[in-house]
Amino acid sequence: MSEELKELIEAAIYKEVASQSLYQFAIQKTDDDAVRQLLNSLIQSEENHLKVLKDLLVKGEFKPKAVTLRLQSLKLDTYVTGGNQLEGADLQNILLYAIKEEQSSSEFYSHLMSTFINQETKNMCRVLASEELEHKLKLELIYDDLFFPEN
């Protein structure tokens, strides 16, 4: 494995750890059991991503799972303002912040995918990008239920 690839994987590991911290922070800000359950699920997903990335560093191999081809989005990160910082944020802004972070993570993995030649590594990036979009959609649906209940 090239040194460049190792550095990129280490950057991805850092991003996953940062996402876990974000969700841990958000859990402390809500009393809603459903939101806590979702955030815990997202923390576990990020932990799974960490395992995949660490295995890739150690073993140099990746066995991809099937990727969801079409994920939908409410595009809240585009059309709803707020969620630009966590300090002093309420649940609404924490969810918006998390939605934006998931979109950013997906874009990060998609960009990485375009830098690799190795198909196995491209597949890893594709799977991780897809999972980040799944997280984003879950968060958007919760946001929609909580803050746009008339829909």
Image (cartoon, rainbow, N blue to C red):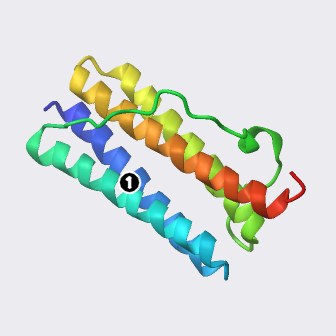
The answer to which of 106 and 45 lies nearer the viewer is 45
Q: In this view, does 127 lie to the left or right of 142?
A: left
In screen coordinates, is 71 left or right of 66?
A: right
Residue placed at 16% from the left, 30% from the top? 2
Q: Where is residue 143 in the image (x, y as percent from the top left)?
A: 73, 57
Give left or right: position of 22 versus 52.
right
In the image, residue 133 sits, relative to residue 150, either above or below, namely: above
Label 1 element class:
helix
- In this view of the protein, which residue sits in the foreground, 36 or 105? 36
Residue 106 seen in the figure: yes
Which residue: 30% across, 21% down? 116
- The residue carrying mark 1 is 14
Question: At 40% from the left edge and 57% from the top edge, which residue is drawn?
Answer: 45
Left or right: 17 as drawn, with respect to 28: left
Can you name the residue that lies furthest to the left here?
Answer: 59
The residue at the far front in this view is 151
Residue 47 picture quarter: bottom left
Residue 144 x, y percent position in the rendering: 77, 54
Picture quadrant where residue 82 is located: bottom right
The N terminus, quarter of image:
top left
Image coords of residue 51 (percent x, y): 25, 54
Say what amino acid the circle numbered 1 marks: Tyr
**Label 1: how many Cα within 10 Å (few below 14, some 14–19, many 20+):** few
Please tell me how many numbered marks the rendered image carries. Answer: 1
